[in-house]
Image (cartoon, helix red, strand yellow):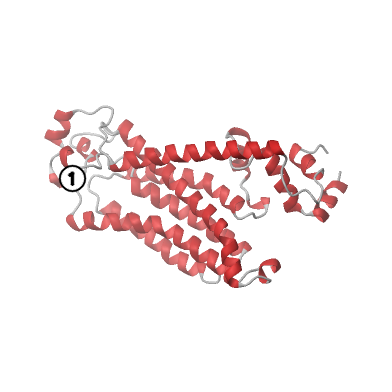
Amino acid sequence: MQRNWKELLASDMSDELDMPPPQGKTLSFVALFFETLGIMVVAIGAIYLRFFPVAPTNFIPSVWITSCSDTRYNRGKGSQEYVPLFYAASLAIPLTLILIGELENCSFPKNYRDKELTVGERIVSGIPRFGRLSGLYIIGVLLTSLCVDYTKLLVSSPRPYILWEYPSICNNLTAPFTSDIFVMQSFPSHISAIVAYCCLFSVRFCYISKLYGNTPTLLIIATQCFLFLIITSAVDRYSNNYSHIEDIVVGLSIGVFFAFYLCHHISLSVRVRDELNFPPLDIIHHRVLPRVSLPPVTEAINHGRMLGPQQQRQKNSAY
């Protein structure tokens, strides 16, 4: 049976090898630079499209000002006040679950090596993992927000599906154009995309934490959080007079798309077994998209370390 480059390289690593070769360090710094640069560009784009007024590509002032100033198509007063709270709470739920899961894993460790450490030492050693998971979640939120708002910018008027007829063209505004910084609130639904992403990310994290850690209360808390996310999306739908079912469906689809891809990286962040990875996502990650999180040489070394000397000898004897 022919072995791939990762297995060949990992099998040649000695037990005393602790540092990657110089070219591995260079690739690591180059990858880190481009990864940081990409995150900054995505963050700037997402924040600009969300919090600054941007006219759509097919902006028609006469149509928007005369047809879309009718307050019947705005949110109710009570709903308008609570939507920012729902939105902020939806964003905070996954971070809260990550924090609770990591604290429980530090308090009730399964790994015999972690049991030899004190609680304080385990918490300190778990800070990098908490940072990786939180950063992964924030990157997904930025990507989802950027995709949704850029789609709004391209297709805000007229609506891209067949159900647009007067006055549906007004449904792209929450208020008159001159007084609303969130110009494009309709297709696709921004809060639906965020809620979908948060739900799937939280489910994946809870599953991995329960499978490979000791988290007795995490699932109980997560159940209440999921109910809150569902209620949030439902309240937004029924209090939003200008949001159609298509807006909700497309928003959910965008959130699910980014959640499926980024949830694949949760197992890499917590260093669990490869059996958890979803094969189609492995193909996308390793063959279609560039791998910038770990250079090939460093990844192969880490792969060899994770196997351990005895597992490496057993793996090599099979060939």
**Where is 166 relative to 195, above or below?**
above
**Where is 267 relative to 29, above or below?**
below
The residue located at (82%, 43%) in the rendering is 12
Residue 227 location, quadrant:
bottom left
The residue located at (70%, 38%) in the rendering is 22
Residue type at the position of mark 1? Tyr
Drawn side of residue 98 relative to residue 80, left or right: right
Can the viewer see residue 160? no
The N terminus, quarter of image: top right
Drawn side of residue 146 relative to residue 6, left or right: left
The residue located at (74%, 49%) in the rendering is 18
The C terminus, quarter of image: top right
Q: Characterize the local packing of mark 1: few (<14), some (14-19) or many (20 or more) Cα atoms within 10 angstroms.
A: many
Viewer-closest of 57 and 165: 57
Question: Residue 306 placed where, x, y %?
Answer: 72, 53
Question: Residue 14 placed where, x, y %?
Answer: 82, 48
Viewer-closest of 265 and 75: 265
Q: Secondary structure at mark 1?
A: helix
Question: Residue 238 placed where, x, y %?
Answer: 27, 53
Question: Residue 133 placed where, x, y %?
Answer: 53, 54
Residue 42 location, quadrant:
top left
Circle 1 residue:
73
Can the viewer see residue 142? yes
The residue located at (38%, 37%) in the rendering is 45
Drawn side of residue 279 relative to residue 17, left or right: left
